[in-house]
């Protein structure tokens, strides 16, 4: 009997409370929450960046991302999943510059960079802040 109460207290109650508190929230908003007490969202900031990029870019775009060792631990699979069907390439990948330089004229290419990063892909281009994520987005090619 004690085990049942312990399991309910540790697992069932926090998840039920989370579901009650966020009942009418949409999927994007849920991805950006800290999660339930017993199952914290490890990729909260990654989801925030990916969701902001998704709002700004077209589905047929190419997105050039910084390396996946961001200060908050990006996860490639989270970024690729959220930005699909956009094509996503990460700085430092073997074929990264091939995609940066040899895209069709009808393809829009965007770069995402950490603001203040010396290796910024945006250089002097117009940049758009991605809300409170400390990341910026710029259009490289249209």
Image: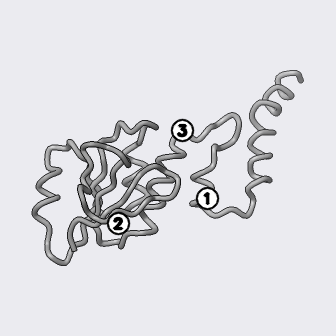
Cβ atoms at labels 1 and 3 below 8 Å apart: no
Of mark 3 and mark 2, the one earlier in the sequence is 3
What is the tally of numbered marks visible in this picture?
3
Task: Identify whether 68 is placed above or below 7.
Answer: below
Q: Position of residue 24 (x, y in %)?
A: 73, 64
* Residue positioned most to the right: 1
Quarter location, residue 69 = top left
Q: Kindly state the secondary structure of the residue where label 2 is placed.
A: loop
Q: Position of residue 8 (x, y in %)?
A: 82, 33
* Relative depth, front residue between 99 and 78: 99
Mark 2 is surrounded, within 10 Å at the Cα level, by few (under 14), some (14 to 19) or many (20 or more) other residues, namely few
Quadrant holding the C terminus = bottom left
Alpha-carbon distance for marks 1 and 3? Answer: 15 Å
Q: Position of residue 120 (x, y in %)?
A: 27, 49
Q: Kindly state the secondary structure of the residue where label 1 is placed.
A: helix
Q: Residue sitting at 52 percent across and 53 percent down?
A: 132
Kindly identify which numbered label has been placed on residue 42. Answer: 3
Cβ atoms at labels 3 and 2 below 8 Å apart: no
Q: Which residue is mark 2?
A: 85
Q: Residue sitting at 39 percent across and 60 percent down?
A: 83
Of mark 1 and mark 3, the one earlier in the sequence is 1
Task: Identify whether 124 is placed above or below 67.
Answer: below
Of mark 2 and mark 1, the one earlier in the sequence is 1
Q: Which residue is mark 1?
A: 29
């Amino acid at each position: 009997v004690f085990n049942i109460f312990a399991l309910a207290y540790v697992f069932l109650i926090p998840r039920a409370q989370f579901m009650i508190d966020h009942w009418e929230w949409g999927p994007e908003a849920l991805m950006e929450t800290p999660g339930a007490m017993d199952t914290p969202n490890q990729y909260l900031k990654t989801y925030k960046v990916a969701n902001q990029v998704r709002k700004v870019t077209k589905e047929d775009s190419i997105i050039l991302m910084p390396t996946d060792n961001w200060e908050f631990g990006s996860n490639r699979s989270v970024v690729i999943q959220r930005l699909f069907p956009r094509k996503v390439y990460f700085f430092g990948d073997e074929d990264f510059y091939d995609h940066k330089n040899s895209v069709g004229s009808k393809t829009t290419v965007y770069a995402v960079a950490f603001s203040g990063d010396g290796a910024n892909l945006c250089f002097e281009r117009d940049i758009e802040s991605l809300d409170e994520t400390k990341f910026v987005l710029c259009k490289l090619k249209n």
